[in-house]
Amino acid sequence: MTERERAILQLLAEGQSNKEAAAVLNLSPYTVETHRTNMMQKLGLHNTAEIVLYADLLWRVSPLLSMLPASLQDPVSTGVIAPCQYLCIALLLSLRWPICS
């Protein structure tokens, strides 16, 4: 994901609309929608609920991901594993290590 897509992911996960995210980032709502669509396509997400779930799981496992070799720290963009596998692994990691919650 690009930096902009990550920023939009965070704002959407916090409950902001495309219009509100656009105002925060000083972008057109259409630009936010384009980034959102690209991000959802890359991650295999289909709706806002999945965006929120993905962001929550990513937040929970980010401390664990930092322990991996650099080449594996962002498995989605490196193509090491598919987004749905990433979500399953993230869920399992967050359940196994409750200290991350």
Image (tube, rainbow, N blue to C red):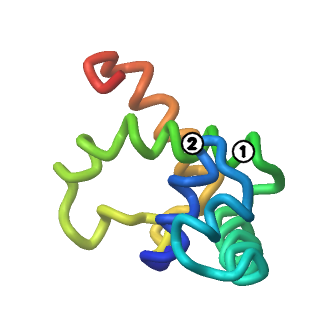
Counting from the top left corner in percent of width and height, residue 64 is at 26, 42
Residue at 46% in and 69% down = 80
Residue at 61% in and 68% down = 23
Q: In front here: 33 or 92?
A: 33
Counting from the top left corner in percent of width and height, residue 55 is at 53, 46
Q: Which mark is residue 50?
A: 1
Q: Is 2 displayed left or right of 49 in the figure? A: left
Residue at 51% in and 53% down = 10
Q: Is residue 90 above or below residue 41?
A: above
Q: Which mark is residue 14?
A: 2
Q: Is 26 displayed left or right of 68 in the figure? A: right
Q: Which mark is residue 17?
A: none
Q: In front here: 96 or 13?
A: 13
Image-quadrant location for residue 100: top left
User: Residue flagged by tag 1: what amino acid is it?
Assistant: Glu
User: Residue flagged by tag 2: what amino acid is it?
Assistant: Glu
Q: In front here: 88 or 99?
A: 99
Q: CA distance from mark 1 to mark 2?
A: 13 Å
Counting from the top left corner in percent of width and height, residue 86 is at 53, 51
Q: Is residue 32 above or below residue 45?
A: below
Q: Classify 10 Å Cα crowding around label 2: few (below 14), some (14-19), many (20 and above).
A: few
Image-quadrant location for residue 97: top left
Counting from the top left corner in percent of width and height, residue 63 is at 24, 42
For mark 1, give the secondary structure. helix
Q: Nearer the viewer, mark 1 or mark 2?
A: 2
How many numbered marks does the figure carry? 2
Q: Earlier in the sequence, mark 1 or mark 2?
A: 2
* Residue 78 in view: no
